[in-house]
Amino acid sequence: MEMQFMLLFSRQGKLRLQKWYVPLSDKERKKISRDLVQTILARKPKMCSFLEWRDLKIVYKRYASLYFCCAVEDQDNELITLEIIHRYVELLDKYFGSVCELDIIFNFEKAYFILDEFLLGGEAQETSKKNVLKAIEQADLLQEEAEAPRSVLEEIGLT
Amino acid sequence: MPAPIRLRELIRTIRTARTQAEEREMIQKECAAIRSSFREEDNTYRCRNVAKLLYMHMLGYPAHFGQLECLKLIASQKFTDKRIGYLGAMLLLDERQDVHLLMTNCIKNDLNHSTQYVQGLALCTLGCMGSSEMCRDLAGEVEKLLKTSNSYLRKKAALCAVHVIRKVPELMEMFLPATKNLLSEKNHGVLHTSVVLLTEMCERSPDMLAHFRKLVPQLVRILKNLIMSGYSPEHDVSGISDPFLQVRILRLLRILGKSDDDSSEAMNDILAQVATNTETSKNVGNAILYETVLTIMDIKSESGLRVLAINILGRFLLNNDKNIRYVALTSLLKTVQTDHNAVQRHRSTIVDCLKDLDVSIKRRAMELSFALVNGNNIRGMMKELLYFLDSCDPEFKADCASGVFLAAEKYAPSKRWHIDTIMRVLTTAGSYVRDDSVPNLIQLITNSVEMHAYTVQRLYKALLDDISQQPLVQVASWCIGEYGDLLVSGQCEEEEPIQVTEDEVLDVLEGLLVSNLSAAVTRGYSLTAIMKLSTRFSGVNRIKKVVSIYGSSIDVELQQRAVEYNALFKKYDHMRPALLERMPIMEKSASNGPTEIVQTNGETEPSVVDSKHPPPVSQPANQANDLLDLLGGNDVVPVIQTTVPTKPASAGGELLDLLGDLSLSGVPTPAPSVATSQPSFLLDGLSSQPLFNDIAAAAIPPMTAYNKNGLKIDFTFERANPNPNVAVITIHASNSTEADMTDFVFQAAVPKTFQLQLLSPSSNVVPALNQGTVTQVIRVLNPQKQQLRMRIKLTYTLKGSPVQDLAEVNNFPPQSWQ
């Protein structure tokens, strides 16, 4: 599944996450995001989740106030891409506990970390929800351990 | 110096901004603080600052000054730093900047780190954005990790290897040994990523494909276990066990089974099993079924299985979920050529989809409907399609109209039906029909001799209603000019004849001349029509007056015609009846559908019409004879051959080729003088168009499309005459390396709005050291005049090893597609 990029954006068109799996300059990325976001926001609710855009296939789904949008190549199975999107939302939901847009805004770096444990180079690296969450949990622990010594020192007054 | 504010604090603050200007101010302030912090080389808060920078970058603000800081974070020993550093690298750096290469060493070290989560970060970053240079440097490390027993790392290494292979295909061989036991893994993550890796290798190399065919039994077994195994909570999605893995295996099986009987047979059973046992109530089950159908259709499956697949698609069409209907229509479109009868069974459902609200579904249903039209269902189908044409969005009308014309031409049950259908299209979607429909329709009408009276009457009535749709008006004017006598004599058999006088007809035609709605071309048609009526109507004076008025028209085209017609009245009145007599039946040599890029002279009819014009006054008598000879007698048919596109079309040669064919078609003597005097006719009037195209063609500069590893591919352009929507590109491949490039294959793909025709190459060996070139002609149809882009795939063998490369060609000169 050659996923070229994934975008998350709000109903007002504000980007909440952008993951690019193809090399593009900042300017090109901005243009693509802007154009695509506008195109998708213009679609009516009854329309199907797939559209052709430039020479890509776009698969998108709205969850509450966030649009999840993936660009895949012509050969790809759109229905399974919808499942990929759904799996990512479930992971976020499990991690944050009933995830909402604010969680992703205030913890965007965590949203990226979770995505990077689920997909790599645009392909799914782990198909078990449990394993992805376990890996994130462990990495978070590692991060806390790295932070901890300093705050202990600070407490004692030995900054 | 107070500690820089925390990330979440900053986010909260920025969100309180009420205007864009306020937000910008906050951002600028914070960026300044971050910049000074960076300058102070503060290690403690670098991570926090970069994280804030990434947030601001996502809002759209520049963050390039943080790039080096990301590198410093990556080099840090702290896990938190590395996490943010790698994230920053993936967001802020791209492989076009040299800065990214500085990461290589850090990544190398981290790939060998003692903590697997650090190794994971490095693998992820490399697999997401590694450039070719980085991939070359680090491929060895990735290969090592591919062989580790740690499944967490192994699965990531597999996908990283996929990325390496995509960037540097030559490195594919080095991963081969490591693939040996990948499928014996129990871990689903490793299995999934391994299948992806195997798929990538098989897609890129026929040798690899042959090598991995032996895995088919193993893949079938794994798939079987997934289906038969009981509930596994870890991988379950709505009752299906690991759908992602199932889909990937099905896809790999597709590639392995294609064109191979044994492999296809080995997977027949499992495909049937998946097709019948998969739960279809949720999207996930349908996703698997969809992949199964694609596989069944692509491999050498037995017919029972194929019918099963098409029936699944038929069921999809009835699904409430529009996404499912969409994929069904897409797949049916792909299979309609090969399994036509099976798809026919679902025709009524497909036609119902024309009424769907979704644009993409409608388009697919329309394309599929046209593919399904045949002699038996033409009346019913056409009814539905015409109804669709009435109510559809403008973006569909042109394609739908063309499709209707094509289908009608192939399967019309009667001439009257055919004419009625054309009338319906012209009146409902008249402004959207393609320009080349007009000459086609004229020819069709001419050849339906018994329908002339009926046709002209209907067209006349249509004109009374509406003169805004140019193609309709043009066809109508032409017909009135031709058959005006039938119109006023009230001879219609098919329907109630209308009473119309000569003056009324001339009123209408003159109205077209003066109307603002009429295009220049339309005016030309009207004037000619008026002129023709001078031999069909009794009252000639009015016509003479009109013609002389337009002799001083500002429009050069009209002026020229009027002057020539005037001359016809004055000096050549004896020739007028013969020149303006009824057109003979024209033989059509090729079909002119919207999907074909045939070099038929789409302007055949108008240019033949124009050839009735008297030549420049200097050579009157001679050429008058030639004209009469050309048209003379009822048995002479001016056959315009299509020039077979084996030779590259050259500008001047184009005209000469057409003329050459004319003289060969058995036109009686003086054929040679006809040939030589023709140029002036074809250059008159409408035929000035080809001339412009030739000038345009001469002006399109050549370009270099590809230049890598010693292989250079140049594109040169011509404009296909006379269809201005077709660009003819000739590729010239040259090889500057020391060895010949053998088995050279050039392939190209274009975006959907274009159509491509690739002709045979001159050779498939590109000689070394630029000693010769391989040429090949590409024809691109670009009706929507969109910017031409192309993806090319080159495969060749150099010094014994196969080379494959993909490239995008985006630097087409604007003249090639405008």
Image (cartoon, rainbow, N blue to C red):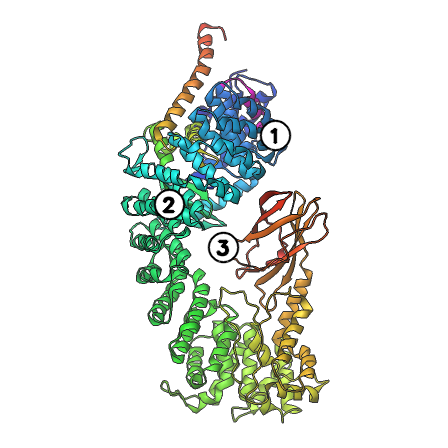
Q: Is residue B238 above or below residue B388?
A: above
Give the residue type that dot 1 points to. Answer: Leu
**In this view of the protein, which residue sits in the foreground, B811 or B650?**
B650
What is the span of residues highlighted in magenta in the rendered image? B65-78
Quadrant that contains the N terminus of chain A: top left
Q: CA distance from mark 2 to mark 3?
A: 36 Å
Secondary element under disc 3, as helix, strand or loop, is loop
Lateral position of residue A59 relative to residue B23, left or right: left
Give the x, y percent position of residue B645: 60, 66
Lateral position of residue B697 relative to residue B28, left or right: right
Q: CA distance from mark 3 to mark 1?
A: 36 Å
**Residue B60 shows up from this direction:** no
Q: Earlier in the sequence, mark 3 or mark 1?
A: 1
Q: Which residue is mark 1?
A: B101
Q: Which residue is mark 2?
A: B266
Q: Quadrant of residue B804?
A: top right
- Tag 3 and tag 1 share a subunit: yes
Give the x, y percent position of residue B138: 57, 29
**In this view of the protein, which residue sits in the foreground, B168 or B482?**
B168
Instruction: Give the crowd class for mark 1: few <14, some 14-19, many >=20 residues within 10 Å.
Output: some
